[in-house]
Amino acid sequence: MPEVPAHATPPQLDAVTEQAIDWLVRLDSGHGSDSDRRAFAHWLAAAPAHAAAWATLQQRLDQRIAPALNQLQTGGHAPTGVRALSAPPPDHRTRRRALLGGATVALLGAAGGSALWADRRAPLMAWSADLHTGTAERRRFVLDDGSDVLLDARSAADLHFSPTQRLVRLRAGALIVQVASEAQRPFVVQSAQGSVRALGTRFMVRQDEGRTLVSVLEHSVRLMPMREDVRMAPTDLAEGRSAWLQADRVEPLTDTRTDPSAWSTGVLEVHDQPLADVLDALRPYTPAILRASPEAARVGVYGVYPLDRPMEVLQALVDTLPLRVRRWGDWVVYVDVRGS
């Protein structure tokens, strides 16, 4: 087994930082009102943590842009260059330059809050995991028993092998496992919601917020929710089927128009799925913080896109859907409905 480094698990992007980013987006939306500015001032003064989070965000702003944001906070108007992209211009090359950084706000990479922002490139929570990947990295591992594990980007798992069991604890992200046959030791993947026991050879497990997606690629698996106070029999899932594993139940996935394991080949496949799902799939492949307005998050998306080029995916969406994208350097990307 790999030796586990003795590192503490640093915090993820916290709620106050998320709020600071939301204020950044709102103040630079072009629709900020006096009421918004008063609400921002109230939020800023409400707690020292709010002021600290905003200061950290400000520290990462390019000096050319910080005065413009100061104007926005006090009721002025920012220069046009603060906007990353509104409605796409007709010339494709100009549009691409705008999205990929021509007219964006540059965020500094080394100022305060470096550990927090560094986590966007190399997930710090994975440092102590037996198996882990960084942002935009897929990696294959061969285990001691000969089983093969493919980790998606920004994923982490621990190994607990003994003479009686082979246990993989999925901390974050997704994995596909090709199980080596070994009758005396069952192979189990455990998530925050329950366990997935191999009855065959190949399956995928993805840890989402509050639930786990399981998809069987070959043969079958057995699902068991983790809540001990809920009595229920294990659920067997057959080849080609997928299900959500909850802490107290198993919910079969009836919509099978897309392949949940398509990430293993570096593609994102969507058929009339909301933009929110697309952004969720892209997040492990970019250090940027991706946000969308509620209206944009509901826009249906079709197509097959390259996971390894998330900014090109966003460009394709701007080209084909009524969306606009604004960027603040390499750190914050905001998608909105065009004309809103």
Image (tube, rainbow, N blue to C red):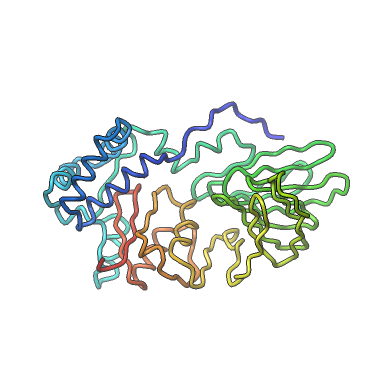
- The extreme top residue here reads 6
Residue sitting at x 17%, y 44%:
73
Q: Residue 271: x and y, percent?
A: 51, 72
Q: Nearer the viewer, residue 340 or 86?
A: 340
Q: Nearer the viewer, residue 203 or 74?
A: 74
Q: Give the quadrant of residue 250.
A: bottom right
Q: Residue 246: x and y, percent?
A: 63, 53
Q: Is residue 133 above or below residue 316?
A: above
Quadrant holding the C terminus: bottom left
Residue sitting at x 18%, y 50%:
35
Q: In the rendered view, does 101 fall on the left or right side of 201?
A: left
Q: Residue 15: x and y, percent?
A: 40, 41
- The extreme left residue here reads 76
Residue sitting at x 38%, y 33%:
114
Q: Is residue 145 above or below residue 281?
A: above
Q: Give the quadrant of residue 97.
A: bottom left
Q: In the rendered view, does 111 fall on the left or right side of 249?
A: left
Q: Is residue 272 above or below residue 336?
A: below
- The mark tally for this picture is 0
Q: Is residue 284 above or below residue 52?
A: below
Q: Residue 58: x and y, percent?
A: 25, 39
Q: Nearer the viewer, residue 257 or 249?
A: 249
